[in-house]
Amino acid sequence: MSHLNRTLVLAGAIVSLCAGESLLRAQNTPPPGGEKKADAPQKGNRQRGGGNFDPAAMRQRMMDRMKETFEVTNDDEWKII
């Protein structure tokens, strides 16, 4: 093949790869957790955990877990820690 033919084939390959890549970027990404239901309200990714999160209850569970880890048996020992 001549130098011009190789250049044209390479240029055509680059153009087709770039065009295919832009088409792939335009595809919709599926939501996490499967297919969308037609009648379900649409939620953003920020609300996928539920919506009834209670920070005070979470803090209490963490404190209870720390007491179990440190093997604290009464509140007087916990106050010292």
Image (cartoon, rainbow, N blue to C red):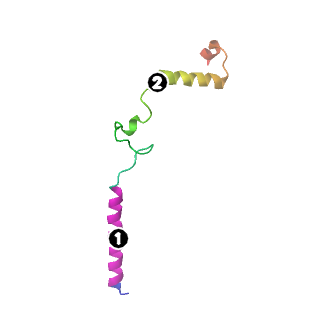
* Circle 2 residues within 10 Å: few <14, some 14–19, many ≥20: few
Q: Looking at the image, which residue is at 62% across and 22% down? A: 67
Location of residue 71 (image quadrant): top right
Give the residue at the far front of this rendering.
39
Q: SS at mark 2?
A: helix
Q: Amino acid at mark 1?
A: Ile
The secondary structure that most of the magenta stretch takes on is: helix
Vertical relation: 14 (above or below) 29: below
Residue plotted at (36% across, 67% down): 17
State which quadrant residue 52 falls in: top left
In percent of width and height, residue 4 lies at 32, 84
Q: Quadrant of the N terminus?
A: bottom left
12 magenta-colored: yes
Residue range (magenta) = 4-25
Q: Which percent across, then down, holds residue 26? A: 32, 55
Quadrant of the frame with the C terminus: top right
Q: Is residue 78 left or right of residue 44?
A: right
Q: Residue at x 38, y 50 (%)?
A: 29
Residue type, label 2: Pro
Task: Say left or right for 46 vs 62.
Answer: left
**Outermost residue to the bottom:** 2
For disc 2, the marked residue is 55
